[in-house]
Image: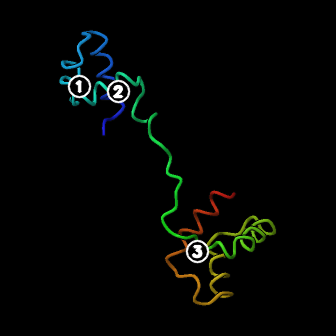
């Protein structure tokens, strides 16, 4: 994968020489890859697609409304406190390793 810096150098060299082979060679890229970025006119960071899919089922889907209610009533609560409450209320359903997942969820929702 090329960096933005390499593609910028490639573009600058290509504008100066007009030759994709030499520009690619001097910028440290493959000719085909260099041609692709010259043709597209975009940087690699502009072509990245966001990661939006899930790799496993959401462990908190069944208690989502309960979590949301707790945050609405007590906005200063930390995710760890809510997680410990959920572990006490639903024994065996949530493992200690799932705390980080709940912390991420709380950060996104707040």
- The residue closer to the viewer here, 77 or 18, is 18
Q: Looking at the rendered structure, which numbered label has been put on residue 27?
A: 1
> Quick check: 12 left or right of 88?
left
Mark 1 crowdedness (10 Å alpha carbons): few <14, some 14-19, many ≥20: some
- The residue closer to the viewer here, 99 or 7, is 7
Q: Work out whether mark 2 precedes mark 3 in sequence or the reverse, and give the earlier one.
A: 2
Q: What is the distance, in whole Å, between disc 1 and disc 3 at their CAs? A: 47 Å
Q: Work out whether mark 1 precedes mark 3 in sequence or the reverse, and give the earlier one.
A: 1
Q: Is residue 23 above or below residue 83?
A: above
Q: Helix or strand or loop: what does disc 3 sit on? A: loop
On the image, the x and y values in percent for residue 44 come to 39, 34
Give the residue displayed 33% in from the left and 27% down from the top.
36
Q: Nearer the viewer, mark 1 or mark 3?
A: 3
Mark 3 crowdedness (10 Å alpha carbons): few <14, some 14-19, many ≥20: some
Q: Helix or strand or loop: what does disc 2 sit on? A: helix
Q: What is the distance, in whole Å, between disc 2 and disc 1 at their CAs? A: 12 Å
Quarter of the image that includes the C terminus:
bottom right
- The residue closer to the viewer here, 87 or 39, is 39
- In the image, farthest residue toward the bottom: 91
Mark 2 crowdedness (10 Å alpha carbons): few <14, some 14-19, many ≥20: some
Give the residue displayed 35% in from the left and 27% down from the top.
37
On the image, the x and y values in percent for residue 58 come to 58, 70
Residue at the spot of label 3: 59
Q: Nearer the viewer, mark 2 or mark 1?
A: 2
Residue at the spot of label 2: 37
Q: Work out whether mark 2 precedes mark 1 in sequence or the reverse, and give the earlier one.
A: 1
């Amino acid at each position: 994968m090329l960096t933005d810096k390499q593609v910028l150098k490639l573009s600058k060299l290509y504008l100066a020489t007009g030759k994709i082979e030499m520009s690619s060679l001097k910028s440290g890229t493959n000719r085909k890859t260099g041609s692709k970025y010259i043709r597209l006119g975009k940087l690699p960071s502009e072509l990245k697609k966001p990661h939006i899919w899930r790799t496993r089922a959401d462990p908190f889907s069944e208690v989502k409304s309960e979590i949301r209610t707790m945050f609405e009533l007590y906005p200063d609560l930390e995710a760890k406190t809510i997680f410990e409450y959920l572990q006490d209320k639903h024994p065996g359903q949530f493992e200690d390793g799932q705390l980080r997942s709940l912390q991420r969820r709380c950060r996104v929702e707040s």
